[in-house]
């Protein structure tokens, strides 16, 4: 039972250590992932949808003003027109008269935005004749219309295929942000074109642009423009109704067309009354010729009003519209103006004049949100200063909003609210984690302080920024500084730069490698006294996962002084030994190796030559005429001559050769690693010529020669003694033959 309990405890400790290690290494990623999951969950519950709509509307309002479209003219049934008609609905006679007059100016298309499912006498017959003679006329119907009992204009236009759906898609907050291209009245029935698409195609037909299916898809394509179908999770929408063929509308922001008009929306507009009563042909030709003419109501009393992103302020987004409320800051537009927007947008997109509003795919949107969550986490983890963080939050928030707005201006609706919430949420989450860690660190510091004050050795504890966080009394006594002076400070604040550099370097090594480190260092205290210290550094982790470095110091100044004295004594003894050895192995006059050194060199040389393919030569050199000079000029001159000869012998040899003085005027040379005896002969020749050169001895010119005997290993001998003997014999033979020459051993 005890073993099982111990194993369980060890297992829990291992799991905890692994969790701490993973969190420390991937804390930014873990933090960002947790926040992203929570935000995405809330997003897909639809909690951010109203805010996303509001943000989108604000982007629309920030958009620059665009010139109103010149390709569309609205014949408005305003309040003045209604008063002049004296009845509603408008009679078929008036409609026929209006259509006839407009048609006479050759418009590209005419849109009749008036429901006429029943005749309105007088003038039904006349209206039918006008319809039959106006092929570019398009009427409206809704998905709920029943054609069975229709006998009016709507029915006539439907039979001729000159009708389009007037269905408008309104979001939950009462705002129109989507347009309709196609829809079905019932499942299985043919697709019906919208009123806006019908008129746009009629106009584009004059530009020789026809609708077609996009390659490898069922999407509508006009010229090079692909109309992507709206899906229920596009942009900021959550589980929206995506029935039919919808598209996200990118409403332009036209300038005000009428002086004194509050609304900054609209197209070229003329009232129905003005058209029926007017006779200025040039004026109406300018208004109608080669243009799309839309006929519809703009009178508030007819209540055909719609809200679009430009219709209200951001802070009033959720307030319902009331035409009777003078205090309401809403600017709705009429249904005919809304259709004008859709028509113009379809045409402009087809002619490559402006882009449609597009969205990213769901994975890319999630990645975008995740990136900003990671940015929030990593910046908060790595920048702990509250002021810097607040400033950075403001800057990055501005960058996020600005970049999202720039993307919107480029035609992309990118989620702002979940991204912003994710970024700020990551910052808040990390801030709470840091606060928790700081509290745990405070408790750890208090505990450490209690423990280390009982230790006589100087102890310090540093955080990952290499600031002192805990010090014992012994450390303060060593440095001469108080705890209040040292806490939260760095080594550079108190110690010379070279000492601080060494401390920081060693600290960084421990933090990086996580290994124990013991180093001898220098420390200058407050009184400028130099201490030699031995510091043991090790890395530790508290319960919150915070890493800190613990250093234990020993003052080794006195020990180092004693060690230095002992080293100095040892050095002196060694120098004396080296001097005695030099004397024992070198000639006192010439500085050349002596007989003893020669014997050791020869034994080693023969040993290495046995295991090689090379030869070894021994040159026995004896000076000719040295005794006469020594006797005539004195021993001092003789010594100078011997030193000169020794120098000349060294100059004639290779770096691997050795010359030794045996005594008197006798020298012996070891030639190592020679390929053949001829090499020894060449060196002997060189020596003879060098020695023959006159020597200046304090005003006297002396001249000597040499006799050289050469023995070769292994040709002449296989041991040291015989080899020397053979060289000596050869030298005497050279003397007998006339001196100043060399001879090989026989």
Image (spheres, helix red, strand yellow):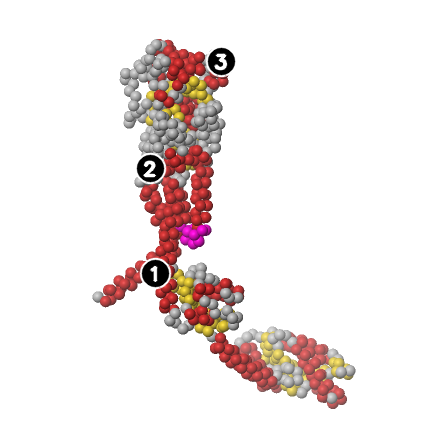
Q: Is residue 358 visible?
A: no
Q: Label 3 near label 2: C-beta < 8 Å?
A: no
In space, the residues marked 2 and 1 are separated at their CA atoms by 43 Å
Residue situated in front as seen by the camera: 716 or 383: 383
Q: Label 1 near label 2: C-beta < 8 Å?
A: no
CA neighbours of label 2 inside 10 A, class few (<14), some (14 to 19), many (20+): some
**Residue 573: image x %, image y %?**
55, 83
Q: Nearer the viewer, mark 2 or mark 1?
A: 1
User: Is residue 412 within the magenta segment?
Assistant: no
Q: Residue at x 41, y 46 (%)?
A: 372
Q: Nearer the viewer, mark 2 or mark 3?
A: 3
Which residue is disc 1 drawn over? 543
Q: Residue at x 33, y 21 (%)?
A: 141
Q: Residue at x 40, y 19 (%)?
A: 78
Quick one: label 2 or label 1, which is nearer the N terminus? Answer: 2
Main SS, magenta residues: helix
Q: Which mark is residue 476?
A: none
Q: Is residue 436 visible?
A: yes
Q: Is residue 155 above or below residue 58?
A: above
User: Relative to 551, is 609 on the left or the right?
Assistant: right
User: Relative to 183, is 703 on the left or the right?
Assistant: right
Q: SS of the residue at dot 3? A: loop
Q: Is residue 175 above or below residue 689?
A: above
User: Relative to 326, is 731 on the left or the right?
Assistant: right
Which residue is disc 2 drawn over? 238
**Residue 743: image x %, image y %?**
67, 81
Q: Residue at x 24, y 64 (%)?
A: 5
Q: Is residue 117 above or below residue 731?
A: above
Quarter of the image where one finds residue 248: top left
What residue span does the magenta drawing correspond to?
377-388
Quick one: label 1 or label 3, which is nearer the N terminus? Answer: 3
Which residue is disc 3 drawn over? 280
């Amino acid at each position: 039972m005890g073993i099982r309990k111990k194993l369980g405890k060890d297992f829990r400790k291992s799991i905890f250590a692994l969790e701490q290690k993973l969190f420390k290494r991937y804390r930014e990623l873990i933090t960002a992932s947790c926040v992203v999951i929570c935000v995405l969950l809330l997003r897909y519950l639809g909690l951010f949808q109203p805010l996303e709509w509001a943000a989108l509307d604000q982007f629309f309002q920030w958009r620059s003003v665009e010139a109103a479209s010149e390709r569309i003219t609205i014949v408005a049934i305003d309040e003045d027109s209604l008063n002049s008609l004296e009845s509603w609905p408008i009679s078929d006679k008036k409609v026929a008269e209006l259509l006839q007059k407009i048609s006479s100016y050759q418009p590209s298309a005419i849109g009749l935005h008036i429901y006429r499912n029943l005749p309105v006498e007088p003038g039904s017959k006349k209206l039918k004749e006008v319809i039959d003679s106006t092929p570019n006329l398009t009427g409206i119907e809704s998905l709920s219309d029943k054609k069975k009992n229709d006998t009016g204009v709507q029915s006539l236009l439907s039979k001729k295929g000159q009708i389009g759906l007037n269905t408008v898609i309104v979001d939950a907050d009462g705002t129109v942000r989507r347009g309709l291209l196609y829809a079905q009245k019932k499942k299985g029935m043919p697709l019906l074109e919208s009123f806006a698409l019908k008129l746009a195609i009629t106009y584009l037909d004059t530009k020789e642009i026809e609708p077609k299916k996009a390659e490898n898809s069922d999407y509508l394509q006009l010229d090079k423009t692909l109309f992507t179908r709206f899906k229920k999770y596009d942009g900021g929408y959550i589980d929206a109704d995506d029935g039919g063929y919808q598209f996200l509308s990118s409403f332009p922001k036209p300038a005000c067309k009428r002086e004194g008009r509050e609304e900054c929306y609209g197209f070229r507009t003329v009232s129905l009354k003005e058209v029926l009563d007017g006779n200025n042909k040039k004026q109406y030709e300018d208004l109608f010729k080669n243009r799309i003419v839309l006929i519809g109501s703009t009178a508030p009393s007819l209540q055909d009003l719609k809200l679009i992103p430009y219709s209200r302020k951001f802070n009033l987004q959720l307030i319902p519209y009331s035409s009777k409320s003078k205090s309401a800051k809403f600017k709705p537009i009429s249904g005919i103006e809304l259709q004008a927007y859709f028509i113009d947008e379809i045409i402009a997109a087809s002619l490559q004049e402006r882009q449609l509003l597009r969205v990213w795919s769901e994975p890319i949107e999630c990645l975008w949100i995740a990136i900003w969550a990671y940015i929030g986490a990593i910046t908060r983890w790595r920048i702990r200063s509250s002021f810097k963080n607040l400033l950075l939050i403001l800057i990055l928030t501005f960058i996020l909003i600005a970049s999202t707005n720039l993307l919107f201006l480029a035609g992309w609706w990118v989620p702002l609210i979940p991204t912003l919430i994710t970024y700020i949420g990551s910052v808040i989450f990390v801030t709470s984690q840091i606060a928790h860690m700081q509290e745990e660190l405070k408790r750890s510091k208090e505990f450490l302080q209690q423990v280390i004050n009982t230790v006589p050795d100087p102890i310090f504890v540093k955080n990952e920024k290499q600031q002192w966080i805990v010090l014992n009394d012994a450390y303060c006594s060593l440095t001469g500084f108080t705890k209040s002076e040292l806490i939260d400070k760095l080594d550079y604040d108190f110690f010379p730069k070279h000492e601080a550099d060494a401390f920081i370097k060693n600290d960084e090594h421990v933090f990086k490698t996580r290994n124990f480190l013991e180093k001898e260092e220098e420390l200058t205290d407050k009184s400028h006294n130099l201490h030699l210290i031995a510091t043991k550094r090790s890395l530790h982790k508290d319960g919150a996962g915070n890493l800190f470095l613990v250093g234990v110091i020993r003052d080794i100044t006195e020990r180092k002084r004693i060690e230095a004295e002992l080293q100095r004594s040892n050095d002196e003894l060694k120098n004396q030994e080296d001097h005695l050895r030099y004397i024992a192995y070198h000639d006192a006059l010439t500085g050349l190796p002596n007989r003893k050194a020669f014997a050791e060199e020869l034994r080693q040389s023969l040993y290495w030559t046995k295991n090689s393919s090379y030869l070894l030569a021994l040159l026995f050199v004896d000076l000719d005429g040295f005794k006469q000079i020594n006797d005539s000029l004195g021993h001092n001159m003789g010594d100078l001559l011997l030193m000169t000869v020794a120098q000349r012998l060294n100059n004639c040899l290779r770096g691997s050769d050795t010359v030794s003085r045996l005594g008197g005027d006798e020298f012996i040379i070891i030639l190592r690693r020679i390929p053949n005896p001829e090499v020894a002969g060449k060196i002997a020749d060189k020596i003879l010529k060098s020695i023959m050169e006159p020597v200046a001895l304090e005003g006297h010119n002396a001249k000597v020669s040499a006799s050289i005997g050469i023995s070769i290993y292994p040709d002449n001998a296989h041991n040291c003694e015989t080899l020397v003997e053979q060289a000596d014999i050869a030298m005497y033979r050279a003397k007998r033959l006339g001196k100043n020459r060399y001879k090989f051993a026989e």
